[in-house]
Amino acid sequence: MTQIRNDEFLVKIGKTLKELRKKKGILQADLVHDTGINITRVENGSRNLTVSSLLVLTEYLDIKMDDFFKLVEKQN
């Protein structure tokens, strides 16, 4: 199966996650420790997330997936 990648969309997802993390005062190191997900690569848009990883991150940041994607769509 070929993996599909949309770099522009991944950057929007990364920016949104970074904004939410910073707004909550969570350090990258703490997020990595608690979730096991390398958030640095996610935040800079270089990692193509699985839906499962994204669910872990949104739950950790206490935001519903549909609300998260609304924020993603507002990214420039």
Image (cartoon, helix red, strand yellow):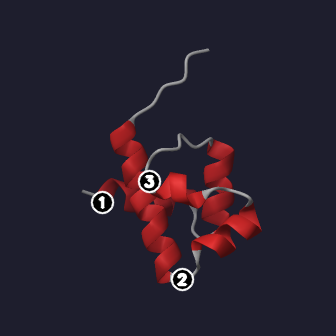
Q: Name the residue under label 2.
A: 24
Q: Name the residue at 73% across, 63% down.
A: 35
**Residue 62 showing in the rendered view:** no
Q: Mark 3 points at which residue?
A: 13
Q: Name the residue at 63% across, 56% down.
A: 38
Q: Which of 76 and 33 is in front in this view?
A: 33
**Earlier sequence position, callout 2 versus callout 3:** 3
Q: Determine crowd level at label 2: few under 14, some 14-19, many 20+ residues with C-alpha closer than 10 A.
A: few
Could you tell me the amino acid type at mark 2? Answer: Lys
**Earlier sequence position, callout 1 versus callout 3:** 3
Q: Mark 2: which secondary structure?
A: loop
Q: Name the residue under label 1.
A: 74
Residue 27 picture location, percent across and down: 58, 78
Q: Name the residue at 63% across, 61% down.
A: 57
Q: Mark 3: which secondary structure?
A: helix
Could you tell me the amino acid type at mark 3? Answer: Ile
From mark 1 to mark 3, how far is it between C-alphas?
11 Å
Determine the residue located farthest toward the bottom in the rendered image: 25
Residue 31 picture location, percent across and down: 66, 70
**Earlier sequence position, callout 2 versus callout 1:** 2
Question: Cβ–Cβ below 8 Å for labels 1 and 3?
Answer: no
Q: Determine crowd level at label 3: few under 14, some 14-19, many 20+ residues with C-alpha closer than 10 A.
A: many
From mark 2 to mark 1, how far is it between C-alphas?
19 Å
Q: Name the residue at 61% across, 52% down.
A: 54
Q: Quadrant of the N terminus?
A: top right
